[in-house]
Image: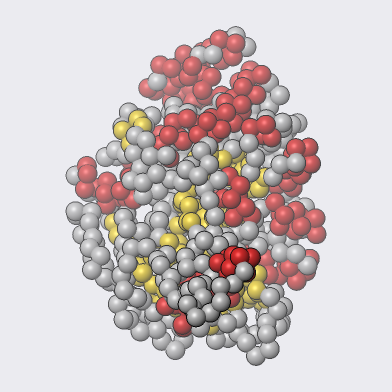
Amino acid sequence: MSIPKLSIIILVSLGVCSPFASASEPVPEKAALETAFQKKHFSPYTNSNYPTEVLWGDTHVHTALSMDAGAFGNQLSPDDAYRFAKGEKVRASTGTEVKLSRPLDWMAVADQSDNLGLFTLLYQGDASFLMRAEINKRLSEKIQQGGEEGVEAALHIMENYANGELESSLNIAPDSTAYKRVWHQIVDTAEIHNAPGHFTAFIGYEWAALSKGNSLNRVVLYRDGADYARAQLPYTTTPPQGSAKPRDLWQWMEAYENKTGGDVLAIAHNGNLSNGKMFPEKQQADGKGLNKHYVQQRAKWEPLYEVTQIKGDGEAHPGLSPTDEFADYETWEMGNHNLSSVKQDSMLAGEYAREGLKRGLKLQQKFARNPYKFGMIGSTGSHTSLATAQEDNFFGKHSGAEPGPKRWKHLLGGDGDLKVVGWQQVASGLSAVWAKENTREAIFDAMERKEVYATSGSRMSVRFFGGWDFTQADIYSRNPAIAGYRKGVSMGGELAVAPAGKAPSFLVAAVKDPYSGNLDRIQIIKGWLDSKGELHERVFDVAVSDNRKIEANGRCKTPVGSTVDVLNASWTNTIGEAEMITVWKDPDFDPRETAFYYTRVIEIPTPRWTAYEAKRYGIEMDKQVPMTTQERAYTSPIWYTP
């Protein structure tokens, strides 16, 4: 059902009884009167004990301190990154001024733990670093000079590093004074910008692991402050101090918590460059068989998955979900992280979130624990220090791909059939967290309970609840959370054993981003494991705009249409809805079958960043370049386990 167009989802709730006695009744004792007031406040918000704020942020921003970000010319610091996220105007590494349309509520600088700060030392000409060897001085001079000399020097370093042949004098070992100084700078900068109640600056880093060129990267996020984070240096991927095996990272995390009493979690990156290694079904990335320990540790340490970012969208793949017409969204399938091997069809199921969720059901049956029971978030993966996920304000993957008339055809990596061209970058994504307040603790706790969702960059508000007793009457409340938490569980939750004769019902509500397009539809995606051990999925349209019809099979095949004017990079919100809310009951529920459900909310077509670029620079791009997009949100699932 769609309801009148409004701009916010939580409004006043009415119908609360008065606590006052009538004039003819005796005045109660003071204690009894106080109890009456506690039970029957006029304002329904005074004793609310549930998350009321959706807070927007990014877990995956690289600054000049990351090796590959520095190599491409990023000279912005963590301080610049946080100031930008908080709404300040900054100057990008290419000299262009840039500002967000709206500040973020929280952010994590996640610089790579390996060789932390290397290019900053080279740019700054750090005296003690240059004295190590003549090559350090020579490369530093070239990088400071810039131009072709600088590019040549940066490529020399990155190629040698990728091949495991980096000169020992350039290595920034984790136990070195230089490394510790940079890590303390990251920690101290987060502390300076962390302002509880106003803006949350998380401490974190990226563990950038490649297994034969296959990306297994994770972001490690701290709930804790400086004293805890300084107690143990970040984990790297380079032996002997580090390892590129996820199970070794989890061991580091356990050691950190045991040593400090702190709390950390890991977020696996979008797996479309892992060549099938992100969601293993039988073997880990290093060839070791999947076992109970792997399943338990992954379930414990990785509650979240980055489902969308600059390097493509990772929710679903059209080859895996052929009946889902929205599955082919910003699909990257050109190979692995190094673009060193051709993508095989057999790899795809180990790379996409929906397939990972399905595989988790089967592994749970085998190991009594689901390793892929993750919530979904989005992030930029930006290497510019700039968390820009909005189509009309997109600053690209790295500083060599910032706005300009030629970036759409700029070669970002690879060659021949295995290459990435500028227009393939995606202006994505953001993380939305339902929390009680804007603090590290509240946001982190919401992440651990998976009450989060991903968007491709739009800031639409989405609520998703599952239970056994939702009815159509619940959609008329102007605060669906009241019924949602009272009758069921929120996104990220688990449904209890099914009451006899009942199927699960779901309350879902969405409100458009006021800066973006109206809503086209709300969908619920179900995945399940049947009694024969076979995995299935099905997409249901549960609410659609403009009075279009949902057929008996649960699908609306009538497109919403488009109002996009590509030449002028504009559109009108004359189609779609500003707000949608509905209750949906699973028509095919079998209480014996393990299942998950998540919501996908899709906007009407709007201009893609390439259309804005073509308009601003007066250029014409090749016909293969997409000029429109349909922004979307993916909620964390709700699981049912018999």
Is residue 511 toward the left or the right of residue 618 in the image? right
Where, quadrant-wise, is the C terminus in this rendering?
bottom right
261, 108: nearer the viewer? 261
Where, quadrant-wise, is the N terminus in this rendering?
bottom left
Q: From the viewer's perspective, is residue 471 above or below residue 53? A: below
> Is residue 270 visible from the viewing direction of this image?
no
Residue found at x 61% / y 22%: 181
Q: How is the image coloured?
A: secondary structure
On the image, which quarter does residue 486 sit in?
A: bottom right
On the image, which quarter does residue 355 sit in?
A: bottom right
**What is the x, y in percent for residue 545?**
33, 75
On the image, which quarter does residue 450 sit in?
A: bottom right
Q: From the viewer's perspective, is residue 128 above or below residue 589? A: above
Q: How many marks?
A: 0
216, 276: nearer the viewer? 216
Residue found at x 56% / y 77%: 26
Q: From the viewer's perspective, is residue 148 above or below residue 554? A: above
> Is residue 175 visible from the viewing direction of this image?
yes
Q: From the viewer's perspective, is residue 191 above or below residue 365? A: above
Residue found at x 65% / y 69%: 494
Residue found at x 61% / y 28%: 183
**What is the x, y in percent for residue 299?**
71, 57
433, 315: nearer the viewer? 433
**What is the x, y in percent for residue 369?**
75, 64
Is residue 610 toward the left or the right of residue 523 in the image? left
